[in-house]
Image (cartoon, rainbow, N blue to C red):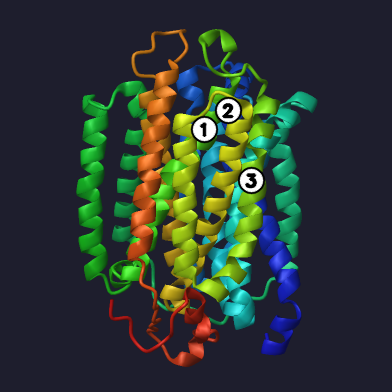
Amino acid sequence: MAAGEVRTHYRVTFAVLAGAVAAYALLQSLVIPVLPTIQSGLHTTQNSVTWVLTAYLLSASIFTPIMGRLGDMFGKKRLLVVALVALTVGSVLAALAGSIMVMIVARVIQGVGGGVLPLSFGIIRDEFPSEKVGGAVGVIAALAAAGAGLGIVLAGPIVKALNYHWLFWIPALALAAVGLLAVVVVPESAVRTPGRISWPGTILLSGWLVALILGISEAPTWGWGSAAVVGLIALAAVLCVAWVVVESRSTHPLIDMKMMRLKAVWTTNLVALLLGVGMYASFAFLPEFLQTPTSAGYGFGVSITVSGLILLPASIAMFGFGVASGPFSKRYGTKAVLVAGTVIGVMNFLLLTVAHAAIWQIIIAMFIQGTGFGLAFAAMSSLVVAAVPSEQTGVASGMNANIRTIGGAIGAAVMSSIVTAGVHHGSLPAESGYTRGFALLTVAAAGAAIAATLVPSTLRARSASSKDTMPHAELGLLAGGTLAGDQSE
């Protein structure tokens, strides 16, 4: 496709990418507030129904970087369509599921759609005019973050008006439409990374991710000191080391370890990990806190729908400030926006720790959280895209999204352990458990702010191929720095 044609249609392409990311983000969180409803509808146990969320996290953790790498190799549009088909098929199967096993299989299939985010970033970098890339990446990142929060808001009204099956039918219909549009509208990029899949690296990556996510997800149930949890985390550590060794020696690595060692990449990934801890944990436990009956001495006894509405300011602010991140980055530099976003995130959790006795306090905290996370997530995406060559955009942004998911799993599991510590079967958690949990999230957010200051202000992209394969080489300016030959960090 000629450059003129691509630029003529880039706004339409962006609309399709935005629709794909929004639908994927909603599927991440729609089930969280209604797991008890799904448990009742499928006649299963509480332990089994948690796999509706865990299976999705496991699958997405494995397939997100793989889909990003395949897109870099075989074409980002082609793999985007594959990801959208997987999301659609998984959603239809989940909507029709009559047993917990079918539901879990459906969620595993949906996890393949985790590639939507890195593939969208790659398409934007390859096909959009360079001056539009920063803003487009910011909006897509904001949609991904805000959509996850919006899913919690919409779950209650959908289930109340229809039933939980429509939590999957609605995204399935939207995804089917977006998939057809992607086939017609989205251009196939000429930027490719020749090679083949490193299957040993892929197997080891899958192994340590499964062991880690499974261990931390089940830790609140099995106990952090149980042999199973300790064994899984130890296995994850061993397999992760083996994966790094294999990938470092591979001629066609799934993930380039030299790229992962770039200061701009590893520092941004550390920020993603710590921010993921806070976002997922707050979205998972604040609805529970709000729905706790006042007879417990705290909480507000509100419905699922009302608790979702109280969290709505977070999604609105996350999207609004995520969109504003692009213009702010051009004026102040992307690193400055990232640091500002993480510092604002600390204020949110600090407020939740010391003041959560009134609904208006929660609402203010949610707006602050949306502001900080909207700025930070959009800035992170721009930094990662700017820090790596065009041919590695998919896998680099895929790993960044993946690390955020891992942080979320860690945050939710640790928060669950803290909140429920000492709680007997059938009794409600003590308010002090939530207070300690919010304090932990404050520490995680502070760690993210410190990590953000380590991100280099000047990014220099490198390419394994000629400059002709990098149509938007000046993208490095988005990070508030300059672009020069090889990355020396």
State the image coordinates of residue 89 (x, y, percent, origin top left): 64, 46
State the image coordinates of residue 443 (x, y, percent, origin top left): 35, 42
Helix, strand or loop under label 3:
helix
Vertically, is 83 above or below 42?
below
- Using the rendered view, name the quadrant where residue 189 is placed: bottom right
> With 179 as the anchor, is 393 left or right in this view?
left
- Using the rendered view, name the quadrant where residue 133 is placed: bottom right
Helix, strand or loop under label 2:
helix
Which quadrant holds the N terminus? bottom right
Q: Residue type at mark 1: give it.
A: Ala
Disc sitting over residue 287 in the figure: 2
The residue lying at 31 percent from left, 69 percent from top is 263
State the image coordinates of residue 83 (x, y, percent, origin top left): 58, 56
Q: CA distance from mark 2 to mark 1?
A: 7 Å
Residue under pointer 1: 284
Vertically, is 205 above or below 80?
above
